[in-house]
Image (cartoon, helix red, strand yellow):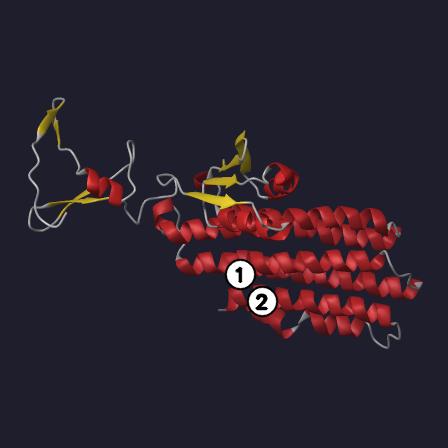
């Protein structure tokens, strides 16, 4: 509509009045019956009708995406579903002629994504719905879950070295690593939700820096979990001497304590402890433990501890800066 168009006011109930919207405007803005529009009053005493509002919360928005499954390999399809999940689409509609043949791989993907469930299935179309109540799940709670899981992984690694039951403990550690990965994707999703809405709109005291720090923490925790899993897997493939197992046990204990101290300094906002940890890096402690080692396989595991040390160091930086 390029010019003013007259509309008659109709009384509705005891206190409201309505006017009809031009059908051309409704079509241009992809609106239909039941959709919400917003009315704002400007400084000239004029009413402005908006088809959407950028600061609507996730609970007010129903974000939908349609993904065709045809012509896509399993990895590509998994990535597209995961991307839609992380980016906050409450409804993910999958369709295509090859949908039936891909239901098993789709289920594997949805089982991995916390809160994503299949709500409806018909020939050629599958509706996935995010049923998680995000408003009742602060990202700090998910971070806490990851922290508890990493503590359990370190514990299993110590027990594995003492008991020599490496295969059993590796399988347990691998399962815990999967849980870390699932929760990391959930943190990522929550970070985007809070960023879109603004932390204050969610009744939270988190500011943009807090959100970035939480995401940075979760990302480095995920890397640490990966390295613990790789150490456990390496232990199933190589036998070491009694002395070498003793060195491994000492490195696990050192890494476990260093990680605990880094999280403590972060939770307590203890900058002095963080600075002290930086002055005594885990890498140096592991190098001391490994003194005069001649075993290449043990050196390979030592490299894993160096990676853990680096990611703990990145976590410590949050407390310092």
Asked whether residue 256 is in view, the answer is no
Q: Which residue is mark 2?
A: 314
Q: Is 208 on the left or on the right of 51, as rendered?
A: right
- Counting labels gives 2
246 shown above or below 147 = below
Is disc 1 placed on a helix, strand or loop? helix
Foreground of the two, 266 or 104: 104
Residue 243 placed where, x, y %? 91, 65
Q: Position of residue 167 (x, y in %)?
A: 84, 49
Inter-mark Cα distance, 1 to 2 = 8 Å
Mark 1 or mark 2, which has the lower sequence index? Answer: 1
Name the disc covering residue 76, or none. none
| Residue at image point 27% right, 37% down | 36
Mark carried by residue 216: 1
Secondary structure, mark 2, is: helix
Measuring 56% from the left and 50% from the top, which residue is drawn there? 185
The quadrant holding residue 207 is: bottom left
Pick whichever, 160 or 9, lies toward us: 9
- Residue sitting farthest toward the right: 241
**Residue 89 point in image, percent of width and height:** 45, 44
Callout 1–callout 2 Cβ contact below 8 Å: yes
Q: Is 303 left or right of 265, judged from the image as shown?
A: right
Q: Picture quarter containing residue 255?
A: bottom right
| Mark 2 surroundings: few (<14), some (14-19) or many (≥20) residues within 10 A | some
**Does residue 222 show up?**
yes
In x, y percent, where is residue 230? 75, 59
């Amino acid at each position: 509509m390029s010019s003013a168009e007259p509309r008659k006011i109709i009384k509705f109930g005891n206190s409201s009045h309505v006017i009809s919207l031009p059908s051309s405007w409704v079509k241009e803005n992809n609106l239909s019956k039941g959709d919400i529009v917003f009315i704002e009053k400007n400084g000239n005493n004029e009413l402005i009708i908006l088809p959407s509002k950028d600061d609507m919360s996730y609970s007010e928005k129903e974000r939908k995406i349609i993904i065709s499954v045809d012509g896509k390999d399993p990895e590509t399809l998994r990535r597209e579903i995961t991307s839609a999940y992380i980016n906050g689409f409450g409804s993910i509609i999958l369709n295509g002629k090859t949908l039936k043949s891909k239901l098993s791989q789709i289920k594997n993907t949805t089982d991995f994504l916390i809160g994503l469930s299949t709500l409806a299935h018909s020939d050629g179309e599958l509706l996935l719905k995010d049923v998680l109540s995000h408003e009742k799940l602060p990202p700090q709670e998910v971070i806490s879950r990851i922290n508890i899981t990493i503590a359990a992984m370190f514990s299993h690694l110590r027990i594995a070295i003492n008991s020599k039951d490496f295969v059993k403990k590796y399988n347990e550690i691998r399962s815990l690593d999967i849980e870390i990965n699932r929760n990391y994707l959930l943190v990522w999703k929550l970070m985007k939700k809070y960023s879109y809405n603004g932390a204050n709109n969610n009744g939270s005291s988190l500011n943009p820096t807090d959100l970035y720090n939480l995401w940075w923490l979760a990302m480095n925790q995920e890397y640490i979990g990966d390295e613990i899993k790789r150490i456990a897997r390496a232990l199933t493939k190589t036998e070491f001497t009694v002395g070498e197992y003793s060195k491994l046990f000492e490195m696990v204990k050192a890494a476990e304590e260093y990680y605990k101290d880094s999280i403590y300094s972060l939770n307590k906002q203890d900058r002095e402890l963080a600075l002290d940890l930086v002055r005594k890096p885990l890498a140096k402690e592991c190098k001391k433990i490994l003194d005069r080692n001649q075993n290449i396989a043990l050196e390979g595991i030592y490299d894993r501890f160096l990676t853990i040390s680096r990611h703990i160091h990145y976590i410590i930086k949050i407390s310092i800066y």
